[in-house]
Amino acid sequence: MRPRSYLFILIALILLGVGLFVLRSQNQQAANQNLLPSFAIENPDDVTLIFMTNQAGDKQIYLKKQSDGTWTVNDSFVASQFKVRFLLEETMSNLHTDGPAPKAAFDNIISYMSINGIKVEAYTGGDQPEMVYIIGNTTPNQLGTYYKKPGDETPYIVDLQGFNGFLNVRYELEEDRWISRTVFSSIKEQIDSVSVEYPEASRSFKMIQPEIGTFVTASEIIKENNKNTGAIRSYFTLFEKLNFETFVFTESDSLYNALTTAQPFCTITVNSKNRGKDELKFFKKDAYEKIHGLYDENGNPLVNDPSRYYALYNKLNRVLIVQDYTFGKVMKEAKDFTNRIEM
């Protein structure tokens, strides 16, 4: 046999050996991965309840799936559907266990979990949770988060494939963070009536839709002979998705109590088939020092914030902040729905 043939055989044997080594390493890695506990929810669509609490038990979040598929928070408010889906589909169902935490760090990690950890339970309809774990702090490189099963003395490093960051901030325990910001959310065909009230009766109006595309108005100035049906039809399309900006975060109820007895400068009420009654009352909000360069026609600094208002919503016992950019388009007056009549 020629020396060149021996060389080819030797190379082939080396390549075969390398391939077998890589294959064995991959199989060993897969076997080790299968021995690691999983913290991921396999079927997020089956989850009906997510319970989260801190170790002291003074902050608790119940996210509950209703019969129509929507989610509520703490049995009191409509939850942000996007946030719940993001938690379930983008986080809880995609958790990846990298491996156990360094043994030398066990005591510190478990100590942190016992004081600051977040306990999470996911239910799929039964009395017993489908998944339970405790979330701790982040890894030193901030690319993973420590998770642990109750009763297990080994914490594990958990992350999301393709995501560099920590996960504990996604399990928020502040109720306000989960409440839906939506005030009006009805398509035109779902709306039974819309009313807009001002202190001046001549500006106020009510529109009723007894049948889809048919409108009856109640107003001092909108009459059958000057009613602009096209403007009314377009107006009904503006209520598909209107959200408030945020809550007024304060320890005192003084502002809320004051507004409940004050006269709003505008009240909008929508009665719909999908949401029932949604009522929003608007109040002027004082301007603040950082509003620069905004003056009235006489050159005086504005007293009221022109871009934001306080608001009270009939489904939340909180003071809201809403933007004129969002709600100004539905603060119409009766004259906006009349045709000019030539004399």
Image: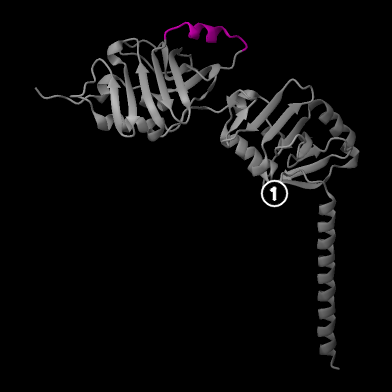
Q: Is residue 212 visible?
A: yes
Report the residue marked by disc 1.
161
In the displayed structure, does residue 24 sit left or right of residue 179? right
Q: Which quadrant of the figure has residue 17?
A: bottom right
Q: Is residue 161 above or below residue 276?
A: below
Q: Residue furthest bottom?
A: 1
Color encoding of the figure: one colour
295 or 324: nearer the eye?
Answer: 324
In the displayed structure, does residue 4 sit left or right of residue 124? right
Q: Which quadrant of the figure has residue 142?
A: top right
Residue at 82% of width from left, 25% of height from top?
115
308 or 68: nearer the eye?
Answer: 68
Write down the region rendered in magenta.
251-263
Residue at 57% of width from left, 31% of height from top?
80
Figure quadrant of the C terminus: top left
Q: Which quadrant of the figure has residue 317?
A: top right
110 or 176: nearer the eye?
Answer: 176
Q: Residue 241, how many percent across, how many down?
A: 45, 32
Q: Is residue 311 above or below residue 183?
A: above
Mark 1 residue crowding within 10 angstroms, few (<14) / some (14–19) / many (20+): few
Mark 1 element type: loop
Q: Is residue 161 magenta?
A: no
